[in-house]
Image: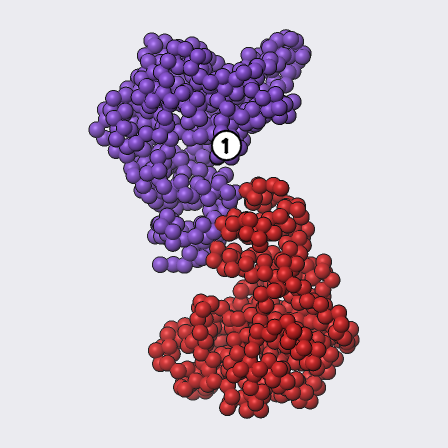
Chain colours: A purple, B red
Amino acid sequence: MRLFYDIIADKRDKKELSGEDISYFLESYLNGGLNDYQMSAMLMAVFFNGLSEKELKTWVEKMLFSGEVLDFSHIDGPVVDKHSTGGVGDKISIPLAPLLAELGFCVPMISGRGLGHTGGTLDKLESIPGFSVNIGKDRFNEIINKNRMLLIGQTPQIAPLDKKLYALRDVTGTVESIPLIASSIMSKKLAEGINGLILDIKIGRGAFMKTMESGRMLASTMKDIGSRFNTKVDVLFTDMNEPLGLTTGNSLEIMESIEVMKGRYVPQVTELVLRMAATLMVSFKMCDSIENGERLALVKLQSGTVAERFKKTVELQGGDSRVIDEPQKVLPSSKLKKEIFADVSGFIEKIDALSFGKALVQLGGGRLRKEDGINYGAGFVFNKKCKDKVSSGDLLYTVHYDDPDKLQAAFEYLREAVKITDEKCGESSIVLGSM
Amino acid sequence: MRLFYDIIADKRDKKELSGEDISYFLESYLNGGLNDYQMSAMLMAVFFNGLSEKELKTWVEKMLFSGEVLDFSHIDGPVVDKHSTGGVGDKISIPLAPLLAELGFCVPMISGRGLGHTGGTLDKLESIPGFSVNIGKDRFNEIINKNRMLLIGQTPQIAPLDKKLYALRDVTGTVESIPLIASSIMSKKLAEGINGLILDIKIGRGAFMKTMESGRMLASTMKDIGSRFNTKVDVLFTDMNEPLGLTTGNSLEIMESIEVMKGRYVPQVTELVLRMAATLMVSFKMCDSIENGERLALVKLQSGTVAERFKKTVELQGGDSRVIDEPQKVLPSSKLKKEIFADVSGFIEKIDALSFGKALVQLGGGRLRKEDGINYGAGFVFNKKCKDKVSSGDLLYTVHYDDPDKLQAAFEYLREAVKITDEKCGESSIVLGSM
């Protein structure tokens, strides 16, 4: 076998690594024969020089087969999941999963936690008292067979190599690399045994991808990986300049999600949920156009069965299922509210997602370090969205908080977060493109 | 203080690091607060993005002051050292140090060991029975005061941060970076308390620097560092396509060095020793031209006092000083010899330094791993040098060896190592340039 040094130096010097080299390097890392400091040098070299298609295939394969690979071949209908690159107010997974289950998909959805200014689906779900995102293998299969969906966190059995690599990337400045991001997401998703994935790539100030160009590169890398492993990957590029929908904060976003599941039209959220469901339906030939798919999905939302499916899921995962009918009673809420009003008239030019994401962390609604606790009730409710007409004195948004000191800290981020202009701005659209 | 992650990410994204960032990062590494895996990611980022002049100054400063800094202000005359980037048959330090001492310099020379295909001065010196390259601080001062020179290895007190960083670079593919090489060499040399440094940058197939261009970059980086720390750095670029002088191998090179010290003209070796001495003399205004300096140095070599100075040094460092008068009796030698003859007539086009360097390792005369032992007697004696006229049947070189299996292994590297051509080649020159 070659020296680790030489394999690192080849990647550093832009020489393509053989499948054997990559397998040996990654296997050695997983079994402890290769040190963290050699792996982090390799990761930084990959950051600079990327991975070729061939290298990437082996890389994903090693991560994917480093642990258990789930098998849903006994299940009728396509098995799908959704992944978002992370944003502010992004609660889409929560209404989408039961909608997809109602439409005939099987949805073993595996989500993540919030970190930094972006929220996490698992944290939001855990604001429902009793709800457990850690489900053992037997119970997992039982729920899937009974309910065709569940909402859980990553298990230690799935892609352990990715877990080990991600922890290292997280402290070595090697997170922001397209092949490393793509291989991390895809290896986990492929290990879930899915046939299809809908990928929501957020673009904008509140997103990891600041430009469409970098978003397109990530999308095409993910689609390539998918096609090499016989998994359909559909991509939507969506706006993340302003917080998604009308709320940010864990309890508040669960309430908003429940409204969507009950058929209420929530700006951006309902639109995106319908579009995603329709995209998957077209992809799996369950309808002939996005428009028809959206129509069918909307009928489901308005029929009440989606909320029922979610209720059943909450029950099966140990949560207090009264949350669907009486969310205000069941969910934790903040003690205090502060309303913010417009001081001029005009049109909303900007509601800055990054600022509101950081402000939410200050309120305790997100975490700066993995070990931080969460204040589930804290958050923001928006009365105005970007491009809206506004008159001086109109309510812009309400802050939900417990601690006046934290409110103060949050406002440090919000001074320039909302901008009102004289001129009418164009129409905004949540979906910027697809691939 | 900033997060380590952010400091790594800044370097990765080509943002200049502040002196505070670099100090914090390097200090944390030395005291264990920063992990190897974070440092190796940083080193790889530096490999790709380099260090600005300002960054480099802080980097060198932190390494230099991470340990003891010697002080020779009580010594008359300039305090100088020499550094070579490493080659095959490079024994220059050994005759140069006593020559410089005889010319009025003080020479606390700190050398290294051989690794890979290049030899090391310390290994060569240790082929002299009893010679110790590890000298305690008190004894160090005693020898310098008495003898104005000594020849030792790096002490643990000098630039410990460089030692720690070098060990990490050595296993993470981050050796071949000009700012990292330059800062490593210069921090150690500056910590010796020298006023001047002559730097021998080897260029060619047997050298780390393959081209003049990369050599010039290293030279200018080292000179910049020198000027920022008030230390004169003179650079010679010298040829390392063929082995230097007439021998490679530890005992054999000591014998050759002693010949040079006794005033015998050894091709390339005497030339380079004179040129280096003269360069330092001009730099410290001890003569007005290189030519005059070389003349003065040659007189010293021929006077016999240089060999006497070396004899005294060997004695002071515990070695068998009869080596100067009876080297053949004192030095370890190989049991067997194999002579290699020319099979055609013509001119020597190539004697490949890299091949002979690797062949020497196979004979046991060098080491592949740091912990390997050395066969001091093994080596090569060359009867012909590049550009020489040769007749079929002429002796080309003699292999000194103990083990026929190792001879076989060595010949694996030597099949194409010597090339004879019909056409007369131009004159060769050991010194390719200076800076």
Q: Position of residue A295 (x, y in %)?
A: 36, 12
**Disc 1 sits on a residue from what chain?**
A
Looking at the rendering, which quadrant does residue B240 occupy?
bottom right
Give the percent coordinates (x, y) of residue A4.
42, 56
The quarter of the displayed image where residue A354 is located: top right
Left or right relative to A212: residue A110? left
Residue at 41% x, 23% y: name it: A125
Q: Give the labeled residue for mark 1.
A: A372
Amino acid marked by disc 1: Asp
Residue B158 appears in the figure: yes
Q: Who is closer to the viewer here, A96 or A141?
A: A141
Q: A147 above or below B39?
A: above
Q: Is residue A7 above or below residue A101?
A: below
In which quadrant is the N terminus of chain A drawn? bottom left
Coordinates of residue B226 in the picture (x, y in percent): 69, 62
Percent coordinates x, y for residue B157 in the rendering: 61, 64
Report the side of B22 relative to A87 (left or right). Answer: right
Quarter of the figure that contains the C terminus of chain A:
top left
From what the image shows, is residue A244 above or below residue B418? Answer: above
- Camera-side residue of A64 and B69: B69
Is A336 displayed left or right of A181 in the figure?
Answer: right
The residue depicted at 55 percent of the width and 57 percent of the height is B165
The residue located at (29%, 39%) in the rendering is A68
View extreme (left): residue: A74
Residue nearest the viewer, comparing B35 with B112: B35
